[in-house]
Amino acid sequence: MLNKDQAADIFKKLKSYSSADEIEVIFYGGKTALTRFANNIIHQNVAEENYGVSLRTVFNGRTARATTNKLDDESLRRVVAASESLAKVQHPDPELLPVADKSVRATRTLPSRHFAQTAALTPEDRAEGVKKIVGVAEKHKLTTAGVFSCGETIEGIFNSRGLAQWHAQTSSEISITMLADKSSGWQKANSPNVAHLDAECLAEIAASKAIQSAAPRELPAGKYTVILEPAAVLDMAGFMFWDFAGLAILDQRSFLTNRVGTKLFGDNINIWDDAAHPLQSGSPYDGEGVPRERLQLVENGVIKRLVYARATAEKMRKSEHKDQVGPVEATGHGFPLPNEVGEAPMNIVFGAPAKENEKTVDQMVASTERGVLVTRLWYIREVDPYEKILTGMTRDGTFYVEDGKVKHGILNFRFNESLIHMFSNVEEMGAPVRASGEESFDMVVPAMKVKDFNFTEVTKF
């Protein structure tokens, strides 16, 4: 693994090769591996180790970036020349800030996200996990497919004003689909610590969903009370967090335009961005090396604030919106420059309900007279950006609930649902957990029971 000392030596070389006013270097990469299986057998095993150096140079307000994954001296000279030649032909940006100063310091200690057990995973270890998954499938006369992956990665950022940030972490992920004749079940989980993943348990849950949803029946489209498991909540919610960027307000492309400080969701919706949360993962600083702050984005349904890169905060302070968007300051949520997106909160944590109000999925089912239980969603697309209306489909375990019991599997639905409406109609919630989906980044989210969820069409499967 590339370490911080080695990266510091490479940075010194790059700095010595450059004639720029300022330079900023991002290091990234690591070791990744995966074992893929289908039809109850392993059919692919791959591994890769790769490191990249991304150099940004600055000449009197002009900036550009060039990247290489070759770390020999000649390649480093070439990447400096490429960045500098590109920077010199750019138009000057009067709003370009100096690179971040080394004085920026994190105010909180991040939990360890590098685990020796995860880093030491071998192909044999992953194969043993797949063996357990296949064993569950064969026991239930099902066919399984999925992935068991792991990695050990680094992120670092150094610049000519003395900033030197470094982060190393491990990752592990299991995704399982169980297939029956006319039904399927799914489960997915990931964690920096592989000890938190139980391949056999995940397989049993996926298998039970495939078995229980066998011979699915048709339920008419309409508005139903819906119980969304965490993966389904995550894949819906992920569509709104790009709109919490200050630049999205300045560009007038956010559904929060003229809504910061207003009550948009139900009283029971509280949302933070918190990189140091024990169930989160990732770097404690942003693409410029600024520490990520813990921010409450939504408090009791009220939109409290936005996130900012350094340059966006400067722009917002000079804009007509500055008095309408809550606190304006760099929050450590920017992406590497140059970019057109600005920033976004990437460590989302939903607040837990009061202990006495916390419900399991089984308890939500038990309190439902007539509704639908959804394992996950897919093929989600935005229909109305301002009302945040999304369309998509259910998948891999959709069930009819009646009189407090799961009765049978049902054919999948297409939905058209507004996130504003959805988060205003949450009747019950579970304890937030680290969840993985397919349409959005990982978050810490609860299962939710939502009234009047709008299903518009029935599929044929």
Image (cartoon, rainbow, N blue to C red):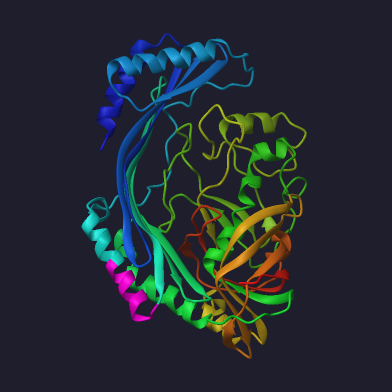
Among the 4 quarters of the image, the one containing residue 392: bottom right
| Residue at the extreme bottom | 403
Among the 4 quarters of the image, the one containing residue 359: bottom right
Q: Main secondary structure of the magenta part?
A: helix
Residue under the image location 77 percent in, 33 percent down: 320
Residue 460 versus residue 261: which sits nearer the camera? 460
**Is residue 138 covered in magenta?**
yes
In the rendering, at what x and y percent does residue 65 appear?
49, 22
Quadrant placement of the N terminus: top left
Q: Is residue 450 above or below residue 434?
A: below
In the rendering, at what x and y percent does residue 69 appear?
35, 28
Report the span colored magenta. 131-141
Residue under the image location 47 percent in, 69 percent down: 186
Residue under the image location 27 percent in, 59 percent down: 126
* Camera sees residue 112: no
Q: Is residue 57 above or below residue 186?
A: above
Quadrant placement of the C terminus: bottom right
**Is residue 32 covered in magenta?**
no
Among the 4 quarters of the image, the one containing residue 391: bottom right
